[in-house]
Image (cartoon, rainbow, N blue to C red):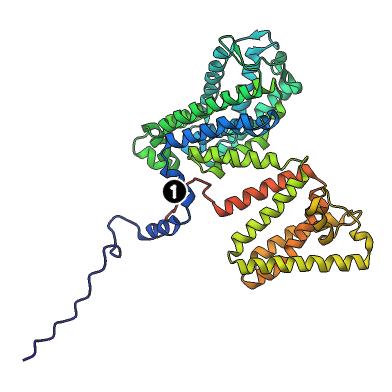
Amino acid sequence: MSEPEQPDVPERPDARQRPRIGVDEWVAQVEERRRGRGRFRAAVERVPAPGRLAAFVALASVFPFVANQGDVFRFGVFTLLYALLAQGLNVVVGFAGLLDLGYIAFYGFGAYTYAFLSSPHRDHHWPAEISIPVVILASAALGLLLGLPSRRLLGDYLAIVTLFFGQAFVVFTNNANPKGITGGANGIPNIDPFEFFGFRLTTTRDYYFFALGALVVVLAALWSLSRSRIGRAWRALREDPLAAAHMGMPVNRLKLLAFAFGAGIAGLSGAIFAALATGVAPGAFDVSLLITIYAIVILGGMGNLTGVVLGAIVINVSFEILTPATPGTARLLFYAAILVGLALALRRWTRLALVLAATAALGLAVHAIAEAARPAWTRGAAESGGFLGDVIEAWVVLPSSPGNAAKYAYIALVAAVVVVTRLRGWARIVALAPLLYLAAFVWENLLVQEPAVTRLVLFGALLVVLMQVRPQGLLGTSRVEIV
């Protein structure tokens, strides 16, 4: 006698497939998909914070002994200054989420205050062990004063008020100059170097190690602060000020603290800059520096201390490499950036090889046609020689007198980039070859001839590429919001 058939009982789903109580599944899936993309960030975070700091100090301490004085000044000291300055902005923007567009004014205030206390300008020659604490406290007090009328403002309104403060500082130091306090447009020269208890800093290497020590102290203090109740309250304020206020957090007081801490760090950076440069002038504290510091914070990852230091290294080193005095280096970086961008966009090596071959063939054909039609179109010379220069002269059309043709080509290049970004599939791949050749033509005939503009263009292109690859920054945390 056969046994009765048992009804089909559905298999119990695996624990990983069951819905989890209190967890948004879509957010969890997004985080799982992104987990493989943040390998660099995960590798860095495996190392504890003291270990990362020790590794950075060890590598930074070796740099002055393997580089000349000029490189220590350009790459070393200013990278540390930018990192220190960006950490102060990181407190305001990254920790507390306050959009402060007048931050550079605190940097300038610190520089001018040190110049007033330690220079022949008013015949005050305070030693650094006294003037630096005064500068930090005065800058923090100024940040507190700025925060008082701004503590109830958020977003665009806060940005407008702080931007006005930053511009007012530049106008005051440049034009107002009551009783010669700021020195007007000429600034304050002959500032005393740092002198601590009879020991004077005289060389670039001395200031490099002092800036490195100041950065280490600030990093250690901010790391401890970020793990404290104030740091957690700042992060809550950054995510949702209204929710933080309803939870009983003193929102206004937290904003004032963020302004004061950031301004104090900026004042310290300004004092180091003033002593290093032995003079201050209003032109050193303009909007371009503010944009650079914001780029460092955003690129490194807002709220991430290690990321901000890494962002300062990437931006300052790339910015210094793209100097007008090195057109050959700039050319190598330009074409290398194009190759990297193509590799990231196309992903398949077969498509990359196809695009490069089509671009090379198109260039040779256009060069041959131009030489046959009008030889003067190919009589120009590359800006710098060498093997790459010879290749460029045989591939890119280089008129002996480009005239307005290069400017029109630049306008066409901008329009072509916009059009290509709207294409999809093979249409985009086919359009890449003429786009790349047009970019090479504009570079060789226009951008190399305008080194100052080229530096900014390449710097902006570098930021665009990096932010396309890592929109949350090099070490930042991606956020998934549910609306």
Instruction: Tell me the residue at 69%/39% (across/down).
Output: 320
Q: Which percent across, then down, holds residue 262?
A: 52, 29
Against 134, is 399 above or below?
below
Residue at screen point 79% across, 55% down: 442
Can see residue 104?
A: no
Does residue 404 appear left or right of residue 3 in this picture?
A: right
| Count of numbered labels shown in the rendering | 1
Residue 244 visible in the displayed image: yes
Residue for point 66% across, 67% down: 353
The N terminus lies in which quarter of the figure?
A: bottom left
Residue 38 image offset from top left, x and y in percent: 47, 52
Relative to 185, residue 25 above or below? below
- Left or right of residue 470: residue 35: left
Q: With respect to residue 295, does 372 lie above or below?
A: below
Return the residue at label 1: 42
Q: In this view of the protein, which residue sits in the foreground, 43 or 4? A: 43
**Residue 334, percent from left and from top:** 71, 51
Circle 1: residue type? Ala
The image quadrant that residue 248 belongs to is top left
Task: Give the crowd class for mark 1: few <14, some 14-19, many >=20 residues within 10 Å.
Answer: few
